[in-house]
Image (spheres, helix red, strand yellow):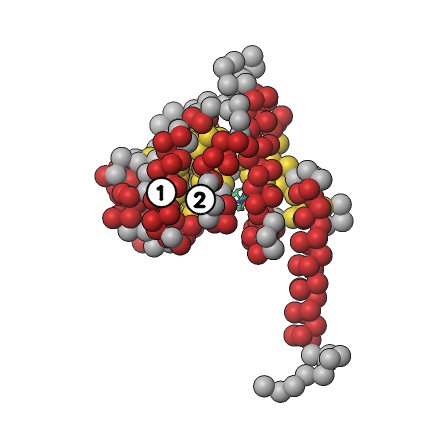
Amino acid sequence: HAKRRENSICPYTQTMRYALQRRQLMSERLSAAISEQRLQLYFQPQVDLTNGRLTGAEALCRWHDAEWGWVSPGEFIPLAEERGLIRGLGDWVLEESARQLMAWGTQNKQALPGRLSINISAQQFADPELTQHIAQLTAGVPTNAISLELTESDFMRDLDQAVEITHAMRKAGYALSIDDFGTGYSSLAYLRRFATDALKIDISFVREMLDNRHDRTIVQTIIAMAQALEMKTVAEGVETQEQARLLAEMGCNEAQGYWFGRPLPADEFAAMWLSPA
Ligand code: C2E
Ligand code: CA
Ligand code: CA
Ligand code: CA
C-alpha cells in the first residue's frame, strides 16, 4: 500500500508503464491499419486425414507494421477485442474473405473445395443480427462456401442467445465449428443444443498427444463425443507425420497444421493448393 512518487524509478512500474504505452500506440496503429485496409488474409489448408485431399481452408488475419514488422495475431486480436476494434476488423475479414472466394470463383476448377473457415470473435457473436450482418458483408458468396469458427467460451456467455444464433446460422446455410475445443467447459448436453457441424481439437492436446497418455485420451474422447453427436472433428496444429497417422487411426476426420501446410497469402495458397483453371 506504499504510496509511490510520480517519478518513481521502481523498475516494475517502469516496465508496466512501458507496456501500457506500447499497447496504446499499438491500438492506434492497428486502428489505422484497419481503416486503411492494410491488414492481410492468409489461408491455411485443411485436409481429409484419410486421403490428404484439400477440404477447405482457414482465413487468418495478418498485420505488418512498418516499424514493428509482423505483429502476432495472438497479440493484436486480444488488443482489438479490448479496444473495441474487433468489429471493424471482423467486418474487414468477412469482406475480404468474400472478395477472395469470388476471385477464386465458385464454379471453376480453381475454386476452393469445401468451405472457407472464418474466425468470429465473442463481441461479433454478441450481435443478435450477426447472421444477417455476415450475409450482407459476404453478398455474392453462397452460404455453403463459408464455415464460421467460434470458441467454446463464446457459446457459454449467453446460452439461450447462442442457441438462437447458431440455429439461425445453420438455417442460412453456414457451417459452424467450435474452435479450440477441449479448453472450455462444454458439456455433452450443451453441445447437442448448438447446431454445430465440427469440433476443432485444440492444438495443446495435439502437441502433447504422442508423449502424454492423458492428452491422447482427451483427443480420443473428443472424437468419440463428436461421432456420437454426428459432428466432424478437425485437429489443429498437426506438425508431424506421427501425429497425423495417430489422429487418422483414432478416426479424426480432418487436420490443419504445418505438416500439411502453413498459412499462405492468397496467390501462393492458390498456386500450391488450387488446381489451375
Ligand atoms: P486459431 O483460430 O486457433 O488459429 C490457429 C492458429 O494456429 C493460427 O495462429 C495458425 O497459424 C496456427 N497454426 C496452424 N498450424 C499450426 C501448427 O502446425 N503449429 C503451430 N504451432 N501453430 C499452427 P495465428 O494465425 O497466429 O492466429 C492466432 C489466433 O488469432 C487464432 O487462433 C485466432 O484465435 C486469432 N485470429 C486469427 N485471425 C483472426 C481473425 O480474422 N479474426 C479473429 N476473430 N481472430 C483471428
Ligand atoms: Ca480458428
Ligand atoms: Ca483454434
Ligand atoms: Ca487458438
* Residue for point 71% across, 46% down: 32
Q: Identify residue type, mark 2.
A: Pro
How far across and down, in percent of the image, does residue 23 sit? 66, 59
Is residue 165 something one can see in this rendering? yes
Q: Is mark 1 within 8 Å of ligand 1?
A: no
Q: Residue furthest bottom?
A: 2
User: Which image quadrant for residue 230?
Assistant: top left
Quarter of the image that includes the C terminus: top right
Above or below, 7 relative to 230: below
254 horizontally vs 109: left or right: left
* Residue for point 30% across, 36% down: 231
36 horizontally vs 208: left or right: right
| Mark with earlier residue (2, 1) | 2
Total numbered badges shown on the rendered structure: 2
Q: Which residue is mark 2?
A: 128
How far across and down, in percent of the image, does residue 264 sit? 59, 33
115 horizontally vs 94: left or right: left
Asked which secondary structure carries label 2, the reply is: loop
Q: Identify residue type, mark 1.
A: Glu
How far across and down, in percent of the image, does residue 206 sit? 40, 46
Label 2–label 1 contact, CB within 8 A: yes
* Residue for point 71% across, 40% down: 36
Above or below, 175 relative to 157: above
* Mark 2 closeness class: few <14, some 14–19, many ≥20 residues within 10 Å: some
Alpha-carbon span between mark 2 and mark 1: 9 Å
* Mark 1 closeness class: few <14, some 14–19, many ≥20 residues within 10 Å: some
Nearest the eye: 86 or 100: 86
Asked which secondary structure carries label 1, the reply is: helix
Q: Which residue is mark 1?
A: 164
Quarter of the image that includes the N terminus: bottom right
